[in-house]
Image: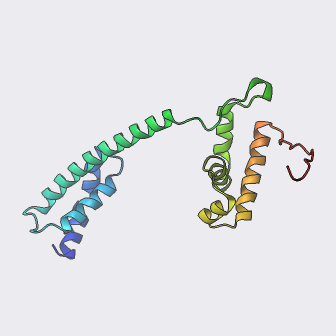
């Protein structure tokens, strides 16, 4: 099938095919595009290309809907099995509401949230975070520090202090 024939089919049927696919799936444009690509590769060309497209779109949309359901089910199961981002503090340590902490983390700018999650939960160094995000390691560290400061302010948690006791060298 030559490009001009495909172009005419797109002009004539694409909108109807998207509407048709929308009955079954959430990404009808993708399904329609895949059907047109598949049609371009058909040898020999189907006798009735429009009917072939509708059948291909129907099958593709149903498959896409099944895949989306499987993905949502898998993501829900994975989320249920994974630990929460935050755990409740012991009663004597001053409590932080885990849900409030999660909301506060989600409210951070993406750059700060990315640095915090990558460092604390992902175990990445600031050099690795910088390389991943196209920044210097010091910029990644600044984003991490400013994000933690904002979280502490929003959650009303003081900055932890380190013991300043010195240890003898050589231990």
Q: Position of residue 10 (x, y in %)?
A: 24, 65
Along the viewing direction, whichever of 49 and 130 lies nearer the viewer: 130
Q: Using the image, determine if residue 160 lies above or below residue 118.
A: above
Residue occupying image coordinates x 30% and y 42%? 66
Furthest-left residue in view? Answer: 47
Along the viewing direction, whichever of 42 and 129 lies nearer the viewer: 129
Furthest-front residue in view? Answer: 170
Residue 90, located in which quarter of the rendered image? top right
> The N terminus lies in which quarter of the figure?
bottom left
Along the viewing direction, whichever of 80 and 30 lies nearer the viewer: 80
* Colour scheme in use: rainbow
Q: Position of residue 2 (x, y in %)?
A: 17, 75
Q: Answer with left or right where residue 31 lies relative to residue 136.
A: left
Q: Answer with left or right where residue 53 lies relative to residue 163.
A: left
Residue occupying image coordinates x 9% and y 68%? 44
Q: Position of residue 21 (x, y in %)?
A: 27, 49
Residue occupying image coordinates x 76% and y 40%? 154
Q: Using the image, determine if residue 91 lies above or below residue 137.
A: above
Residue occupying image coordinates x 74% and y 64%? 138
Q: Using the image, determine if residue 108 lies above or below residue 82.
A: below
Q: Using the image, determine if residue 73 lies above or below residue 140.
A: above
- Number of numbered labels in the structure image: 0
Q: Position of residue 76 (x, y in %)?
A: 45, 36
């Amino acid at each position: 099938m030559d490009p001009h024939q495909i172009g005419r089919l797109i002009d004539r049927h694409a909108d109807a095919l998207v509407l048709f696919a929308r009955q079954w799936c959430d990404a009808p444009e993708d399904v329609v595009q895949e059907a047109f690509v598949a049609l371009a590769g058909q040898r020999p060309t189907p006798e009735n290309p429009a009917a072939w497209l509708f059948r291909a779109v129907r099958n593709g949309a149903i498959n896409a809907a099944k895949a989306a359901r499987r993905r949502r089910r898998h993501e829900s199961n994975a989320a249920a099995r994974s630990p929460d981002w935050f755990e409740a503090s012991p009663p004597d340590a001053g409590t932080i509401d885990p849900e409030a902490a999660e909301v506060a983390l989600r409210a951070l700018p993406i750059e700060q949230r990315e640095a915090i999650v990558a460092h604390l939960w992902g175990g990445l160094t600031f050099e690795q975070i910088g390389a991943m995000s196209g920044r210097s390691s010091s910029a990644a560290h600044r984003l991490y520090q400013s994000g933690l400061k904002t979280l502490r302010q929003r959650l009303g948690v003081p900055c932890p202090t380190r013991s300043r006791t010195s240890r003898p060298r050589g231990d």
